[in-house]
Image: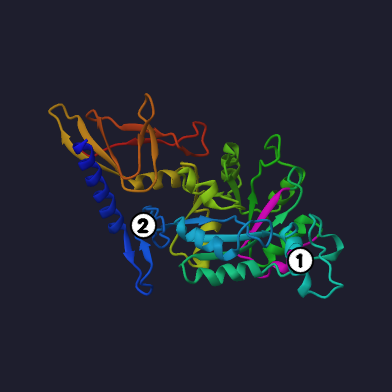
Amino acid sequence: MKRIAAFAIVAASIVTASAQSIYYQDATNVDMARHTLRNDVLRREIVLPEVNGYKVLKADLHSHTIYSDGNVTPEYRVREAWVDGLDVLAVTEHVEYRPSEGKMYSYLKGYLPENMQNINMSNLVKEVGILTDLNLSNELATKAAESYGITIIPGVEVTRTPETIGHYNALFVKDANTIYDADPAASIRKAREQGAIIMHNHPGWRRKNLQMTEFEQKVYGEGLIDGVEIMNGSEFYPSVVNRASENKLFMAANTDIHSTTAMDYTNQGHYRNMTFILAKDASQESLMDALKKRRTLAYSFGTIAGDEELVKDFFLACVQFETIRVDEKGRRYMRMTNNTSMDFVLNFGGNPVQLRSFTSRNVSVAKGKELTFTVENMWVPTEQKHPEFKLKFKK
């Protein structure tokens, strides 16, 4: 019993000491202690290399707030993007679909004239046009972003029947209030007249297949589309990788976030969807130039997709090859080091193996032979789908 009592006393003293070490006296309130584990919000840094002289900027080109059908404010979206490690965010409220307006109207009813009515609650704007300020969300986000170093791309989403027409983000818009037209193609043209870039959103959503509709063939044929989401949320459209390449469109992966990325991604241990934009800097001009020249990669749930040359350049910028020794038969023993936050799944002709972020793997290759492997979590517009590497090393 004495031993048990002594152990209890020691354990209690350890708990007390531990408690004292993690609480500290508040500087202004003598009767309050604060916990050291309650830190300020920290940013999750995502380490990526420069590729071909360009920075790889982490972007989300599709997001929503309470000013359409999202659950959070523009200011929250910006802070969330900063915490998640992004450099660029596009706030893209629905032009035609803004159900939160009805809730806002009900909340402010006592402040508004009695004869006022909300008429933009439905999916059809019809003849009444746009009565609210569709630029406000972007203005609020841009103001908030000044404190976080995030670049905001002003945008809107043209939202029509997904089975027949689809949804389209207009990026770099100058005045969102002038884009709506009863004819969705006319809406897209109006955005283009402002100098906007048009991205085709989630082309497979609520579809039975990815065959292009008559409307899609029309706007693609007119050259009105600049890019396409090959990944949206958890959806991936492998065949659209080929479509993007054939039509010279930039490829994107975006969250289309309505709730929070903590709920949909980070609390489950994932990075959020990102479009990697290879640009000189994060200015509007550099970002637009990169999108027009298709310097993008799509990232979603550990998979990276894009044009083959750019995918390969990205991988070789991420992974360093170092020769450890060469034996008497000329066999080269090397270390592959992944210096980035990305994980890769490699196949050297057998079972897939992982090269996780900030780890190394040893490989060897016979004299005069190429080191041949595929990266199976990367997708390119070729028949084999995954990029194949054949690396030859100097003697």
Q: Position of residue 71 (x, y in %)?
A: 63, 56
Q: Position of residue 246 (x, y in %)?
A: 59, 43
In this rendering, does residue 214 appear at all?
yes
Q: Tell me, yes or no, whether the highlighted magenta stretch contains residue 336.
A: no
* Start-end of magenta stretch: 166-181
Q: Position of residue 159 (x, y in %)?
A: 72, 54
Would you say 320 lies left or right of 44 here?
left
Look at mark 1 in the image and give the residue it sits on: 105
Which is nearer the eye, 317 or 15? 15
Which is nearer the eye, 326 or 178? 178
Q: Quadrant of the C terminus?
A: top left
Identify which amino acid the numbered label 2 is placed on. Leu
- How far apart, in angstroms, are the residues tagged by discs 1 and 2? 41 Å
- Which of the two marks, 1 or 2, is nearer to us in this view? 2
Which is nearer the eye, 84 or 214? 84
Would you say 277 lies left or right of 172 here?
left
Identify which amino acid the numbered label 1 is placed on. Tyr
**23 in relation to 331, above or below:** below
Assign a secondary structure to mark 1.
helix
**265 in relation to 181, above or below:** above
In this rendering, does residue 307 appear at all?
no
Name the residue at 35% across, 29% down: 348
Q: Quadrant of residue 21?
A: bottom left
Look at mark 2 in the image and give the residue it sits on: 37
Q: Position of residue 373 (x, y in %)?
A: 36, 32
Q: Tell me, yes or no, whether the highlighted magenta stretch contains residue 168.
A: yes
Task: Say whether disc 1 or disc 2 marks the residue closer to the N-terminus.
Answer: 2
Name the residue at 22% across, 46% down: 10
